[in-house]
Amino acid sequence: MRVDPRDVIRVKRDGGRLGPELIDDFLTGYVEGRVEDYHASALLMAIFCHGLDDVELLAWTRSMLESGTTFDWSHLDGPMVDKHSTGGVGDKVSIPLAPALVACGAKVPMISGRGLGHTGGTLDKLEAYPGLRTELPIERIRSQMEELGFFIAAQTPDLVPADRKLYALRDAAGLVEAIPLIASSILSKKLAEGLDALVLDVKFGAGSFLPDHEKGLRLAGRMAGLAKGFGLPMTVVLSSMEQPLGRMVGHANEINESLDCLRGEGPRDLVDLTVRQGGEALLACGLAEVLQAGEDRMRASFSDGSAMEVFQHFLKAQGAEGDLSKDLPTASGEAFLVAPKDGYLACLDCRQVGVALQALGGARVEIGGGLDHGVGLEVLARHGDWVEGGQPLVHITHRDGKGVEEAQMHLARAYQVALEPPNPVGETRTLV
Ligand code: URA
């Protein structure tokens, strides 16, 4: 069927319902170049305003998924699992989680993303390793899965091409924050990985991608419905992004902290969240009978060195030069944010910590832009701690003074010291 794209736009513009054929014709035409960017942005805006109901969302996601290659791992043993996080400040969970899951008997085909704005991306963090490649051709991805049962790589041009085009357009047109568009974008890529189970970490709090808690819950609900529609077992975990996860923010910094976690020595919040998500993944894919057993296996893979061993194989397979932490870039400038007075520390705007990293040059400001892997922040005191005036709260690593004053200003907005203890940060919980 060939439909005039303007007829599809009109239906949604007027609040109507799009049938699966209309959706498929439009998206296929967009990927093939028959439908122009201006048509697609008009339809995306109409969807932004009127939404997609569950039947439309399923059809939209299916068309995106079928726009390119999908993986089939039926010739490999072991369940395929992955996790996705809606993103936050200092969220490096994927890096220790993926090798630990492999050490526990799962396989992890992880298509991951880059950071934009105040939230970091796993690929950028891994690229702190000189020589490490994340843009892998599809054949290399397949052979690495066969050899190692694990990869972390960027979306390839033939994987969900509809999402590549639509995401760039949404970014350029200010249309990223629409729940059905986010849900279909994330899940089409995860479905293309050929998974048996997925854990979705929906972050809430000021440092998250969707700080509005109610919106985060709506996204989780839409994604849970979609996963069910595709028959993909998916567990949704809700976790706090009210303060940075762990102590380290910045690329080389976060790799070092991930290595601590792989050694079983990382900060408690990071280790606990990694273990929780891993436990949920092992439970969802049948490698654990109850959550506690999955969590115990995760912790054992850290303490017996098996997760670290898998990670070292991964580094070699993806071209990292040097070993573990020795060759990671570091900037040499040092500065601090200090407590202005005695009192309880509260992290009131975690997003500002991500923006401070950006000011130092450690985060991307535009798609395709550069970043400095060697700058970063170490958070020396946690939300709720009693601190004394003059005590260092954040250690800043900078390159030749670039952005230090701006970073200090953002950090001063993020943290407040008061005589009353702040409300505790929210607990991690499993939603579905
Ligand atoms: N991440 C994605 O992959 N897609 C979105 O739309 C938002 C975040």
Image (spheres, rainbow, N blue to C red):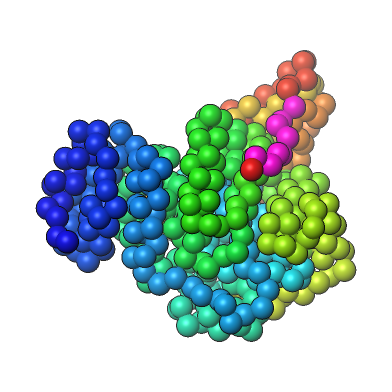
Q: Residue at x 68, y 62 (%)?
A: 285
* Image quadrant where one finds the N terminus: bottom left
Q: Residue at x 61, y 60 (%)?
A: 197
For this rendering, which residue is in front, 410 or 287? 287
* Image quadrant where one finds the C terminus: top right
Q: Is residue 243 left or right of residue 165?
A: right
Please state the horizontal and vertical placement of residue 133, each as a whole percent of the image.
53, 74
In reply to whether residue 149 is colored magenta, the answer given is: no
Residue 285 in view (yes/no): yes
Please tell me whether residue 30 is drawn above or below residue 72 in the rendered image: above
Q: Is residue 264 left or right of residue 383?
A: right
Please state the horizontal and vertical placement of residue 90, each as a whole percent of the image.
64, 48
Please state the horizontal and vertical placement of residue 129, each as a whole percent of the image.
61, 69
Please tell me whether residue 336 is drawn above or below residue 296 in the rendered image: above
Q: Is residue 150 left or right of residue 266?
A: left
Residue 398 in view (yes/no): no
Please state the horizontal and vertical placement of residue 339, each as a whole percent of the image.
73, 28
Please tell me whether residue 395 is drawn above or below residue 131 in the rendered image: above
In reply to whether residue 429 is colored magenta, the answer given is: yes
Q: Which residues are magenta?
A: 424-431
Direction top: furthest residue: 419
Please tell me whether residue 61 is drawn above or below residue 313 in the rendered image: above
Q: Is residue 168 left or right of residue 90?
A: left
For this rendering, which residue is in front, 125 or 411? 125
For this rendering, which residue is in front, 75 or 33? 75
Q: Main secondary structure of the magenta part?
A: loop
Q: Residue at x 30, y 34 (%)?
A: 50
Q: How many marks?
A: 0
Q: Residue at x 58, y 82 (%)?
A: 75
